Amino acid sequence: MRLRHGQHNDLISWESEILGNGVLPVDGANAENCYIEDTIKIGAGTKIYPNVIIVGEGYIGEGSVIGPGNRIENPRIGKEVRMKHSCGISHATIDNFTNVSEFVTIADFDGVEKKRTFIGSKCMIGVQVRIMGGSQIEEECFVADGARVSGFLSPRTYFNSEKALKDPQYSAYHTNCAWYLAGYYLAMQSAVFPDERAEFIEKIMKRCGGDEEIFKKWLKTPIMHMGGQTPLKSLKKEGGKAIKCLLGECMHGVPEKSAQT
Protein backbone atom coordinates (compact mmCIF):
# COMPACT_ATOMS: atom_id res chain seq x y z
CA MET A 1 0.00 0.00 0.00
CA ARG A 2 1.65 3.21 -1.13
CA LEU A 3 1.20 6.40 0.84
CA ARG A 4 2.31 9.86 -0.13
CA HIS A 5 3.85 11.84 2.71
CA GLY A 6 2.53 15.38 2.43
CA GLN A 7 3.77 16.85 -0.84
CA HIS A 8 7.02 14.91 -1.00
CA ASN A 9 5.87 11.61 -2.53
CA ASP A 10 7.82 9.59 0.05
CA LEU A 11 6.70 5.99 0.60
CA ILE A 12 5.65 5.29 4.17
CA SER A 13 5.85 1.86 5.70
CA TRP A 14 2.73 -0.26 5.20
CA GLU A 15 3.49 -2.03 8.46
CA SER A 16 3.76 1.09 10.63
CA GLU A 17 1.15 3.36 9.08
CA ILE A 18 -1.53 0.81 8.20
CA LEU A 19 -1.11 -2.44 10.10
CA GLY A 20 0.31 -0.59 13.08
CA ASN A 21 -2.90 1.40 13.42
CA GLY A 22 -5.10 -1.69 13.44
CA VAL A 23 -6.33 -1.47 9.85
CA LEU A 24 -7.08 -4.90 8.37
CA PRO A 25 -6.04 -5.73 4.78
CA VAL A 26 -8.38 -8.28 3.16
CA ASP A 27 -8.03 -10.58 0.13
CA GLY A 28 -4.45 -9.63 -0.55
CA ALA A 29 -4.64 -5.86 -0.20
CA ASN A 30 -1.06 -4.62 0.04
CA ALA A 31 1.40 -1.86 -0.79
CA GLU A 32 1.40 -2.78 -4.47
CA ASN A 33 -2.32 -2.69 -5.22
CA CYS A 34 -3.59 0.10 -2.94
CA TYR A 35 -2.75 3.79 -2.71
CA ILE A 36 -3.63 5.77 0.41
CA GLU A 37 -2.21 9.18 1.19
CA ASP A 38 -0.92 9.75 4.70
CA THR A 39 -3.32 12.66 5.15
CA ILE A 40 -6.11 10.07 5.41
CA LYS A 41 -6.70 8.78 8.95
CA ILE A 42 -8.22 5.30 9.16
CA GLY A 43 -9.73 3.88 12.34
CA ALA A 44 -8.81 0.55 13.90
CA GLY A 45 -10.65 -2.52 12.67
CA THR A 46 -11.43 -1.03 9.27
CA LYS A 47 -11.07 -3.53 6.42
CA ILE A 48 -9.38 -2.46 3.20
CA TYR A 49 -9.69 -4.57 0.03
CA PRO A 50 -7.37 -4.53 -3.03
CA ASN A 51 -7.22 -1.76 -5.64
CA VAL A 52 -8.43 0.97 -3.30
CA ILE A 53 -7.37 4.58 -3.81
CA ILE A 54 -7.97 7.16 -1.06
CA VAL A 55 -6.56 10.66 -1.56
CA GLY A 56 -6.84 14.18 -0.18
CA GLU A 57 -7.52 14.95 3.46
CA GLY A 58 -10.04 13.21 5.67
CA TYR A 59 -10.83 10.17 7.76
CA ILE A 60 -12.57 6.80 7.83
CA GLY A 61 -14.01 5.67 11.15
CA GLU A 62 -13.44 2.47 13.09
CA GLY A 63 -14.84 -0.83 11.92
CA SER A 64 -15.71 0.29 8.40
CA VAL A 65 -15.31 -1.79 5.23
CA ILE A 66 -13.86 -0.32 2.03
CA GLY A 67 -14.44 -2.86 -0.74
CA PRO A 68 -12.27 -3.51 -3.81
CA GLY A 69 -11.82 -0.94 -6.54
CA ASN A 70 -13.20 2.03 -4.64
CA ARG A 71 -11.88 5.52 -5.42
CA ILE A 72 -12.36 7.99 -2.58
CA GLU A 73 -11.37 11.66 -2.34
CA ASN A 74 -11.44 13.89 0.76
CA PRO A 75 -13.69 11.59 2.81
CA ARG A 76 -15.37 12.15 6.14
CA ILE A 77 -16.64 8.65 6.80
CA GLY A 78 -17.98 7.53 10.18
CA LYS A 79 -17.69 4.21 11.96
CA GLU A 80 -19.16 0.91 10.77
CA VAL A 81 -19.78 2.22 7.24
CA ARG A 82 -19.93 -0.50 4.58
CA MET A 83 -18.88 0.39 1.04
CA LYS A 84 -19.13 -2.43 -1.51
CA HIS A 85 -17.01 -2.22 -4.66
CA SER A 86 -16.26 0.01 -7.66
CA CYS A 87 -17.61 3.23 -6.16
CA GLY A 88 -16.42 6.75 -6.91
CA ILE A 89 -16.81 8.99 -3.86
CA SER A 90 -15.74 12.66 -3.91
CA HIS A 91 -15.94 15.16 -1.04
CA ALA A 92 -18.62 13.25 0.86
CA THR A 93 -19.54 13.06 4.53
CA ILE A 94 -21.07 9.66 5.34
CA ASP A 95 -22.29 9.09 8.89
CA ASN A 96 -22.18 5.94 11.02
CA PHE A 97 -23.72 2.58 10.04
CA THR A 98 -24.56 3.57 6.47
CA ASN A 99 -24.36 0.97 3.70
CA VAL A 100 -23.12 2.04 0.25
CA SER A 101 -23.76 -0.56 -2.46
CA GLU A 102 -21.60 -1.24 -5.52
CA PHE A 103 -21.10 1.17 -8.44
CA VAL A 104 -22.31 4.19 -6.47
CA THR A 105 -21.14 7.61 -7.65
CA ILE A 106 -21.08 10.62 -5.33
CA ALA A 107 -20.03 13.73 -7.24
CA ASP A 108 -18.57 16.93 -5.83
CA PHE A 109 -20.05 19.16 -8.53
CA ASP A 110 -23.67 20.26 -8.96
CA GLY A 111 -23.18 21.67 -12.44
CA VAL A 112 -22.13 25.10 -11.20
CA GLU A 113 -19.72 24.68 -8.30
CA LYS A 114 -18.04 22.10 -6.11
CA LYS A 115 -20.00 21.15 -3.00
CA ARG A 116 -19.65 18.55 -0.25
CA THR A 117 -22.37 15.90 -0.09
CA PHE A 118 -23.85 14.73 3.23
CA ILE A 119 -25.33 11.30 3.94
CA GLY A 120 -26.72 10.71 7.42
CA SER A 121 -26.41 7.68 9.65
CA LYS A 122 -28.06 4.30 9.05
CA CYS A 123 -28.86 4.91 5.38
CA MET A 124 -28.99 2.36 2.56
CA ILE A 125 -27.64 3.57 -0.78
CA GLY A 126 -28.58 1.13 -3.55
CA VAL A 127 -26.66 -0.21 -6.53
CA GLN A 128 -25.62 2.31 -9.22
CA VAL A 129 -27.08 5.27 -7.35
CA ARG A 130 -25.83 8.66 -8.55
CA ILE A 131 -25.68 11.51 -6.04
CA MET A 132 -25.00 15.05 -7.20
CA GLY A 133 -22.63 17.34 -5.33
CA GLY A 134 -24.21 19.25 -2.46
CA SER A 135 -27.04 16.76 -1.92
CA GLN A 136 -28.18 16.09 1.63
CA ILE A 137 -29.61 12.72 2.62
CA GLU A 138 -30.77 12.58 6.22
CA GLU A 139 -30.67 9.60 8.59
CA GLU A 140 -32.32 6.24 7.90
CA CYS A 141 -33.08 6.98 4.25
CA PHE A 142 -33.29 4.15 1.72
CA VAL A 143 -32.26 5.13 -1.82
CA ALA A 144 -33.35 2.48 -4.32
CA ASP A 145 -31.11 0.96 -7.01
CA GLY A 146 -30.40 3.23 -9.97
CA ALA A 147 -31.80 6.38 -8.38
CA ARG A 148 -30.42 9.85 -9.05
CA VAL A 149 -30.38 12.17 -6.05
CA SER A 150 -30.06 15.92 -6.42
CA GLY A 151 -31.15 17.95 -3.42
CA PHE A 152 -32.58 17.04 -0.01
CA LEU A 153 -34.11 13.85 1.39
CA SER A 154 -35.80 14.17 4.78
CA PRO A 155 -35.18 11.54 7.50
CA ARG A 156 -36.60 8.05 6.93
CA THR A 157 -37.47 8.67 3.27
CA TYR A 158 -37.67 5.82 0.78
CA PHE A 159 -36.60 7.32 -2.56
CA ASN A 160 -37.11 5.51 -5.87
CA SER A 161 -36.75 7.88 -8.81
CA GLU A 162 -36.29 5.08 -11.35
CA LYS A 163 -39.71 3.56 -10.64
CA ALA A 164 -41.32 7.01 -10.66
CA LEU A 165 -39.92 7.69 -14.13
CA LYS A 166 -41.40 4.46 -15.46
CA ASP A 167 -44.74 4.86 -13.69
CA PRO A 168 -46.08 8.46 -13.49
CA GLN A 169 -48.60 7.35 -10.85
CA TYR A 170 -45.78 6.38 -8.50
CA SER A 171 -44.21 9.07 -6.30
CA ALA A 172 -40.43 9.04 -5.97
CA TYR A 173 -40.64 10.17 -2.33
CA HIS A 174 -42.17 8.05 0.43
CA THR A 175 -41.76 9.66 3.83
CA ASN A 176 -41.35 7.50 6.94
CA CYS A 177 -41.09 4.42 4.72
CA ALA A 178 -37.43 3.64 5.45
CA TRP A 179 -36.26 2.11 8.71
CA TYR A 180 -32.90 0.95 10.06
CA LEU A 181 -34.09 -1.72 12.48
CA ALA A 182 -31.56 -3.72 14.49
CA GLY A 183 -29.05 -3.65 11.65
CA TYR A 184 -31.58 -4.32 8.87
CA TYR A 185 -32.43 -1.70 6.23
CA LEU A 186 -36.16 -1.75 5.46
CA ALA A 187 -37.97 -0.14 2.52
CA MET A 188 -41.64 -0.29 3.46
CA GLN A 189 -44.79 0.02 1.38
CA SER A 190 -46.53 2.18 3.98
CA ALA A 191 -45.30 4.54 6.65
CA VAL A 192 -44.27 3.81 10.21
CA PHE A 193 -44.05 7.06 12.16
CA PRO A 194 -41.35 7.80 14.76
CA ASP A 195 -43.64 7.38 17.79
CA GLU A 196 -44.86 4.02 16.43
CA ARG A 197 -41.27 2.87 15.94
CA ALA A 198 -40.27 3.85 19.47
CA GLU A 199 -43.28 2.11 21.02
CA PHE A 200 -42.73 -1.03 18.94
CA ILE A 201 -39.07 -1.34 19.88
CA GLU A 202 -39.73 -0.61 23.55
CA LYS A 203 -42.45 -3.26 23.87
CA ILE A 204 -40.69 -5.98 21.87
CA MET A 205 -37.36 -5.40 23.61
CA LYS A 206 -39.14 -5.72 26.95
CA ARG A 207 -40.54 -9.08 25.85
CA CYS A 208 -37.02 -10.09 24.77
CA GLY A 209 -35.65 -9.25 28.19
CA GLY A 210 -33.65 -6.38 26.74
CA ASP A 211 -31.48 -8.82 24.79
CA GLU A 212 -30.70 -7.43 21.33
CA GLU A 213 -29.65 -10.82 19.95
CA ILE A 214 -33.00 -12.34 20.93
CA PHE A 215 -34.72 -9.35 19.33
CA LYS A 216 -32.79 -9.85 16.07
CA LYS A 217 -33.65 -13.56 16.06
CA TRP A 218 -37.32 -12.78 16.63
CA LEU A 219 -37.34 -10.38 13.68
CA LYS A 220 -36.44 -13.30 11.38
CA THR A 221 -38.76 -15.88 12.96
CA PRO A 222 -41.97 -16.76 11.01
CA ILE A 223 -45.16 -15.92 12.91
CA MET A 224 -48.35 -17.87 12.24
CA HIS A 225 -50.53 -14.87 13.10
CA MET A 226 -48.78 -13.01 10.24
CA GLY A 227 -49.45 -15.77 7.72
CA GLY A 228 -46.08 -17.38 8.33
CA GLN A 229 -44.18 -14.22 7.48
CA THR A 230 -41.32 -12.95 9.60
CA PRO A 231 -41.71 -9.60 11.38
CA LEU A 232 -39.20 -8.09 8.94
CA LYS A 233 -41.23 -9.16 5.90
CA SER A 234 -44.47 -8.06 7.53
CA LEU A 235 -43.07 -4.60 8.24
CA LYS A 236 -41.70 -4.27 4.70
CA LYS A 237 -45.04 -5.26 3.18
CA GLU A 238 -47.49 -3.52 5.51
CA GLY A 239 -45.49 -0.90 7.42
CA GLY A 240 -47.44 0.63 10.27
CA LYS A 241 -50.39 -1.68 9.61
CA ALA A 242 -48.31 -4.60 10.87
CA ILE A 243 -47.30 -3.00 14.17
CA LYS A 244 -50.38 -3.83 16.23
CA CYS A 245 -50.49 -7.38 14.89
CA LEU A 246 -46.84 -7.94 15.78
CA LEU A 247 -47.50 -6.53 19.24
CA GLY A 248 -50.55 -8.79 19.63
CA GLU A 249 -52.81 -5.76 20.01
CA CYS A 250 -54.94 -6.23 16.91
CA MET A 251 -58.53 -7.53 16.84
CA HIS A 252 -57.91 -10.30 14.30
CA GLY A 253 -59.46 -13.53 15.45
CA VAL A 254 -61.34 -11.86 18.34
CA PRO A 255 -65.08 -12.71 18.23
CA GLU A 256 -67.31 -9.70 17.76
CA LYS A 257 -69.59 -8.86 20.66
CA SER A 258 -73.19 -9.80 20.05
CA ALA A 259 -75.48 -6.90 19.37
CA GLN A 260 -77.53 -5.80 22.35
CA THR A 261 -81.26 -6.18 22.00
Image (cartoon, rainbow, N blue to C red):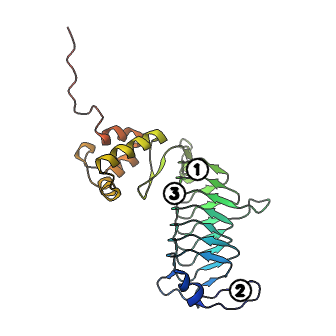
Q: Which residue is mark 3?
A: 122
Mark in front: 1 vs 2: 2
Q: CA distance from mark 2 to mark 3?
A: 33 Å
Mark in front: 2 vs 3: 2
Q: Which residue is mark 1?
A: 165
> Can you give x and y, in whole percent of width and height, for residue 247 in the image?
31, 41
Residue at x 57%, y 65% (from the top left corner):
78
Mark in front: 1 vs 3: 3
Q: Quarter holding the N terminus?
A: bottom right
Rendered image: mark on residue 34? none
Q: CA distance from mark 1 to mark 3?
A: 26 Å
Rendered image quadrant of residue 92: bottom right
Residue at x 22%, y 23% (from the top left corner):
256
Residue at x 40%, y 49% (from the top left corner):
236
Label 1 crowd (10 A; few <14 / some 14-19 / many >=20):
few
Vertically, is 248 above or below 255?
Answer: below
Q: Which residue is mark 2?
A: 5
> Can you give x and y, in whole percent of width and height, for residue 9 in the image?
73, 89
Vertically, is 151 above or below 12?
Answer: above
Q: Callout 2, which amino acid?
A: His
Q: Callout 3, which amino acid?
A: Lys
> Can you give x and y, in whole percent of width and height, for residue 79 in the image?
53, 66
Q: Callout 1, which amino acid?
A: Leu
Label 3 crowd (10 A; few <14 / some 14-19 / many >=20):
many
Tell which circle, 2 or 3, labels the residue nearer the N-terminal end.
2
Residue at x 32%, y 46% (from the top left corner):
206
> Can you give x and y, in whole percent of width and height, for residue 66 in the image?
54, 74
